[in-house]
Image (tube, rainbow, N blue to C red):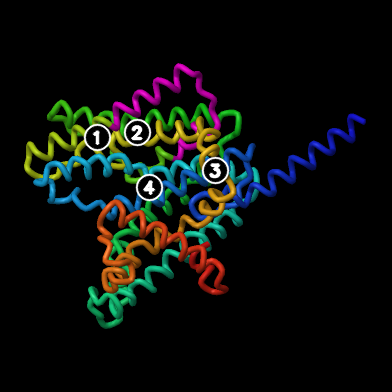
Amino acid sequence: MSSLYFNNKKMNLIELTSNNCKSADILLNDNISNKTKTVFDYISFIKIISAYSVIILHTNPFFGDNFKNKKKWIISNFIEQFFHFGVPFFVLCIGATLLDFNEHYGLKEYYKRRFFKVIFPLISWNIILYYYRIYFVKNLKKNTFDIVKLLNMFFRNKIYGLFYSFHIFIITYMIIPLLAYVEKPKKIEIYIYCFSTLLVTQSLIPYLIFVFKLKLCWPYKIEAGYIIYIFSGYIIQNKKFSRKIKIFIYFIGLISFLIQVIGTHILTYKHNSVMLKHTGYLKLPTILYCNSLFLLIKEYNEFIFKVFNKKIINILGSLTIGPFFLHWPVIDFFRKYPKLIFNINLISFYGGSLICIICFLLTYIFKRIPIIKHLLP
């Protein structure tokens, strides 16, 4: 009887894991099994709001040199800082879901997935949008074919600047295998050490030098600094924090968010130019804000899914690659044909939300077309 019970439980666990692998895909739909269905639901939700936040940031109208309109700029600054979690959230998801990939498949399969889910689509969309800008948008001159120039445009994000974040993702994917093979019992301890070291040397000390205007040179900069989010993503996903620690993290996150908003506002009007000394993906306030918000969503995901349907969230979570590639070309398209959307101003909060909806719909359609679906895995 006990043997039968054990076998049934084992089969149920295998079935649950298999079914949930499909909805657990991180940024580019990676099939990584995990412990509970809740994990995959909250990762899908984070991917959705991350994609949405990226579009909102790119359609935020008054954050640039328009700060002289003070009332509108205050709102725009708040939006900018609030939605600043977009790219960091995706890297946090990578850390939360991929650092145990070696428990499910080997390096060969890992690199194969990375190529077809990241490298191939990125190269393909750069080529497509290169000609899209030349012949449709007509804001890029056609040059004689020069492979070096094309490669430089690709590496410098001169085809569509929105692809800069993919270089961050590629670097983190390259580093993942080195980190994944750390012995399981020691992972949390080692990752906490790595996160703490990076936080202090790459964010805290440079930030203190700026805040207190210290005439101090700090040469210890790591170009792949985004790996700090990989470590914290895994730690948040796998470590249980006490209630007091969680409250402290939320409090620090709130203070960091206020520093971003208020600090940017004060410096901008002091120097009569937009100053981003308090904000940036590797700046101390942003790191603390993004990590605390990530933890908050993870801890209260059950409340979130009382409001949002899990099935819909998991479906949308599998489409988040589309908005990254499509949102700026879609903006260019509707700028050329504004009557198709009733002349709605796209560079606005409402316009950005509309573009996000359109991009998700296009991705849903494209993923059902035989050849095109491979460009949006």
- The disc placed on residue 289 is 2
Q: Measured from the top left, where is residue 164 in percent x and y?
A: 33, 56
- The disc placed on residue 41 is none
Q: Earlier in the sequence, mark 3 or mark 4?
A: 4
Q: Quadrant of residue 327?
A: bottom left
Residue 116 is a magenta residue: no
- The disc placed on residue 260 is 1
Give the secondary structure at mark 3: helix
Q: Residue at x 61, y 56 (%)?
A: 109
Q: Kindly indicate whether the residue at mark 2 contacts the one at mark 1 (C-beta within 8 angstroms).
A: yes
- The disc placed on residue 87 is 4
Q: Measured from the top left, where is residue 182 in percent x and y?
A: 56, 36
Q: CA distance from mark 4 to mark 1?
A: 17 Å
Q: Residue at x 32, y 45 (%)?
A: 223
**Which is more toward the observer, 294 or 105?**
294
The residue to which callout 3 is attached is 97
Q: CA distance from mark 2 to mark 3?
A: 20 Å
**Which is more toward the observer, 155 or 320?**
320
Q: Earlier in the sequence, mark 2 or mark 3?
A: 3
From the viewer's perspective, is residue 346 above or below residue 368? above
Q: Residue at x 36, y 48 (%)?
A: 53
Q: CA distance from mark 1 to mark 3?
A: 29 Å
Dot 3, how many residues are within 10 Å of its Cα: few (below 14), some (14-19), or many (20+)? many
Q: CA distance from mark 1 to mark 2?
A: 9 Å
